[in-house]
Amino acid sequence: MVGCSGCSSNSSCSSCQFGFFLDTGSCSPCLNLMNGCLDCFNSTSCLICESGYFLESSTSQCQKCETNLSGCAFCSSGAQCEQCQSGFYLNASSCLLCNDSNCITCNQSSLCVQCASGFYLNGGSCSPCSSLHSSCLFCNSSDCLICKVGHFLSLGSCQVCPDNNCEVCNSSLSSQCLHCNTGFFLSAGSCSACSNSINGCTECSSNSVCSSCDEGHYLLAAGAGCEPCSQSLRFCKSCSSSSICTSCSNGNILANSSCHLCSDFLQGCSFCLVSSICLSCSQGFYLNTSTHNCERCTNLEGCLICHEDQSCEQCDSGFFLENSTCFDCNSSMPGCIVCSDNSTCQICEGNLSLSSGGECVEIFPSS
């Protein structure tokens, strides 16, 4: 039995280990019922609190030191701090914030004695390592100890790796790269682009093994290369294999791991978000905003673009628009196949000529 130090039978505990209390023949952990309690008498009375807590005598519960004492890490009571958190210093029984926000340990006069990583101690205050040595991440008061990515340490200062695509280069032989940036692989101490060796590859370990492909490609088995999604999946923008598409190009929708035209699901639809909601219709249709479906421009002869109220906006060739309705040019002007209105023809039939008055006349009138 967990937490049991003495038992009266195989199934009943008579005393518990430190950190547990006896509860009807079994032992329960104090911490599970009371935050910060290391040892307790029962489920509501704590005896010893863990570090960072103090025992509130009136409730027999553990309270966080910082609840009563801001910045306090360890306390003996709700009014007496013994040790402060980083960035604070002990002043009598409470903690005061160090004047320098980059200081993790300061003395009672608020002079810093230890700075945060990336800073060095400079006359009781903290200065950034980059002000001492350009591109330096960690330093002491005189020398850089660790440089930023793409730089190497030389005589206490940082120098740029000769290869722009190198992340870590050899400090004793700067021309030799040890680790390349993402998208490049190491070859004979220098970095080469994955995409130059493997089409569509964004991450690789060599010129023949790819680990990640760019959008529009999928990774072949064993990292053998990247294949375009569109080669086997129509309208596919990104995919996980030659048969599973994960996103489609604009104007197409994903269904059952493949891409489809909106018109495959919605008649006359040219652009949609899902297979049941159209946003734009093809010519000869109008968008029904209530159903989000495309309806034909029915009973509107010659109409290319129409509205929900069956009014036409644009007519087909050979028709002219008048009062939101399309009329046949030939009906108004015999022999006219393209016109701008009911009295102005623009193109006549092949055996007719357009007169200066905008009418179609015979080229050689019969005698």
Image (spheres, rainbow, N blue to C red):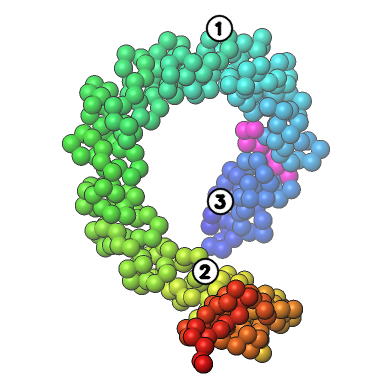
Circle count: 3
The amino acid beneath tag 3 is Gly
Observer-side mark, 2 or 3, equals: 2
- Classify mark 3: residues with Cα within 10 Å, few (<14), some (14-19) or many (20+): some
Of the two numbered discs 3 and 1 on the same chain, state the one appearing first in sequence.
3
- Classify mark 1: residues with Cα within 10 Å, few (<14), some (14-19) or many (20+): few
Mark-to-mark CA distance, 2 and 3: 64 Å
Work out whether residue 15 or residue 57 is closer to the camera in this orientation and state it.
57
Residue position marked by numbered label 3 in the rendering: 3
- Tell me, yes or no, whether the two marked residues, 2 and 1, touch with CB atoms within 8 Å: no
Residue 98 in sight here = yes
Residue position marked by numbered label 2 in the rendering: 251
Mark-to-mark CA distance, 3 and 1: 54 Å
Position of residue 246 measured from the top left corner of the image (x, y, whole percent): 44, 66
Observer-side mark, 3 or 1, equals: 1
- Please give the name of the residue rendered at 42% of the width and 63% of the height, measured from the top-left corner: 238
Residue position marked by numbered label 1 in the rendering: 123
For the residue labelled by badge 2, is the local secondary structure a helix, a strand or a loop?
Answer: loop
Q: Which residues are magenta?
A: 45-52
Work out whether residue 120 or residue 224 is closer to the camera in this orientation and state it.
224
Of the two numbered discs 2 and 3 on the same chain, state the one appearing first in sequence.
3
User: Residue 265, relative to residue 163: is it above or below?
Assistant: below
User: Residue 74, relative to residue 295: is it above or below?
Assistant: above
To which quarter of the image does residue 293 belong? bottom right
Q: Going by the picture, which residue comes out furthest to the bottom?
A: 367
To which quarter of the image does residue 341 belong? bottom right
Mark-to-mark CA distance, 2 and 1: 64 Å
User: Residue 93, relative to residue 12: is it above or below?
Assistant: above
Q: Is residue 200 left or right of residue 283?
A: left
Q: Going by the picture, which residue comes out furthest to the right?
A: 58
Position of residue 129 measured from the top left corner of the image (x, y, whole percent): 47, 18
The amino acid beneath tag 1 is Gly
